[in-house]
Image (cartoon, rainbow, N blue to C red):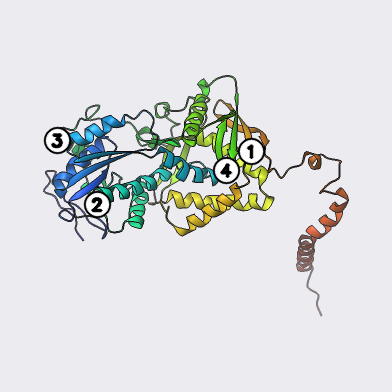
Amino acid sequence: MNRVSGDGNGDRRVVQRASYEAAPGEVGRVLLLYSGGLDTSVMLKWIQEEYGAEVVALTVDLGQPGEDFEVVRGKALQFGAVEALLIDARERFAYEYVLPAIKANALYGGGYPLFTALGRPLIASIAVEQARAHGCDAIAHGCTGKGNDQVRIESTVLALAPDLKIVAPVRSWQMGREEEIRYAREHGIPVKGGSEAPPYSIDDNLWGRSSEGGRIEDLTEPTPDDAITLVTDPRKAPDEPQDLVVEFERGCPVALDGERLGLVELLQRATEIGARHGVGIVDHIEDRVVGLKVRDLYEVPAAAILLCAHRELEKLVSTGLQNRLKPVLEEQWSWLVYAGLWYEPLLADLNAYMDSVNEQVTGSVTVRLYKGSVRPVARSSPNALYDPALATFGESGGLFSQHAAPGFIELFTLQSRMAHRLRSEAARAGREPEVKR
């Protein structure tokens, strides 16, 4: 096991604490997950220097809004990458990762719709594919030792390609922010805003946006206004509500207000509509896999709309027993994905159940959007377990007979009544004075 040593002048050597971590000299070509920001740009140079390795930069498009990916590729080549790859994975992300989350009504901790957690195993699996294709013997990422993403990415790589090594510079180089900025300037890497760090750490894709760090970490303060950039402040949202009809086929959202859309476009459209009405702001206290408790801000308008509509339609077409069991399984599904265990067999088992239930989830739900709120106001499905005639008080007929109710009540409550009687008798006996003989 290697340990970090230094001479006090910025010399940092690599720490190796697991067998799959690469030490200098062990790898010749490294595939780097590259975002184009300061951290990954510094990493690109650092890997070349510390490992003496060639670097192939990989950028994955998961629908990050406003990103100029050609500029990102240009920066990677400018800073020494031998190749700069750009993979458009929006369709794959939507259908293979977001759709299962919709079917599972996935929310971790009751609030986080897992958009980053869903994206990381896809990015890591693409990294494995491209590492194989481009002759790399290691994969590098920019995750810190305090986050969940290191678990999500490395667990995926270990599952798919245990022979590939991992390089995690931010976790091992032990540079502070000032050291990192100094290193960047020494190597001609632009630093925006001088020595000031960006106010928040941002991550986004088709399914949502997160902000953390900075003033968000002060739990005594309300949500900082400057941290919310995607969703309209609900106080400034339109004064008139909007009703939006969401149509599903077998659990997959397929249309908004009667217009059929591919899933990528539908997610983008739902994001725009929800954001306009201030929908989807989540101020969340979260328990990370690594043991930390943190505060995150999420902007998830598409998830807020589609999960609300999907849950409502699913309740309509599922039996009461299914509706009691599925939330329990959804919680387990969400935990496995949050923890990065995308290749855990239990997740495949749960997906099979989610798919089975969603075979019946066809129909439409109208949701009303108004100043940050979203609620269902109408539902329709050919598979609805609902009959208006049976739901009307005072009428009998068809599959339901009110005359059968007394017998049902007598049998249904039998054990409860017996148990209550026995316990009441025991309690009375316990209060009676002891009889002297």
Q: Nearer the viewer, mark 4 or mark 3?
A: 4
Q: Residues within 10 Å of mark 1 (few under 14, many from 20)?
A: many
- The residue indicated by pointer 4 is 251
Q: Nearer the viewer, mark 2 or mark 3?
A: 2
Quadrant of the image containing the C terminus? bottom right
| Mark 2 / mark 3, whichever is N-terminal | 2
Marks 4 and 3 in Cβ contact (< 8 Å):
no
Looking at this view, is 414 or 429 the one in front?
414
* Element marked by disc 4: loop
Q: Nearer the viewer, mark 1 or mark 3?
A: 1
| Mark 1 / mark 3, whichever is N-terminal | 3
- Please provide percent x and percent y for residue 124: 34, 48
- The residue indicated by pointer 1 is 363
How far apart are the two marked residues, 1 and 3, measured between alpha carbons? 57 Å
- The residue indicated by pointer 2 is 138
* Element marked by disc 1: strand
Which kind of residue does numbered mark 4 sit on? Gly
Which kind of residue does numbered mark 2 sit on? Ala
Q: Residues within 10 Å of mark 4 (few under 14, many from 20)?
A: many
Quadrant of the image containing the N terminus? bottom left
Which kind of residue does numbered mark 1 sit on? Gly
Instruction: Please name the residue shown 36% across and 57% down the image.
Output: 159
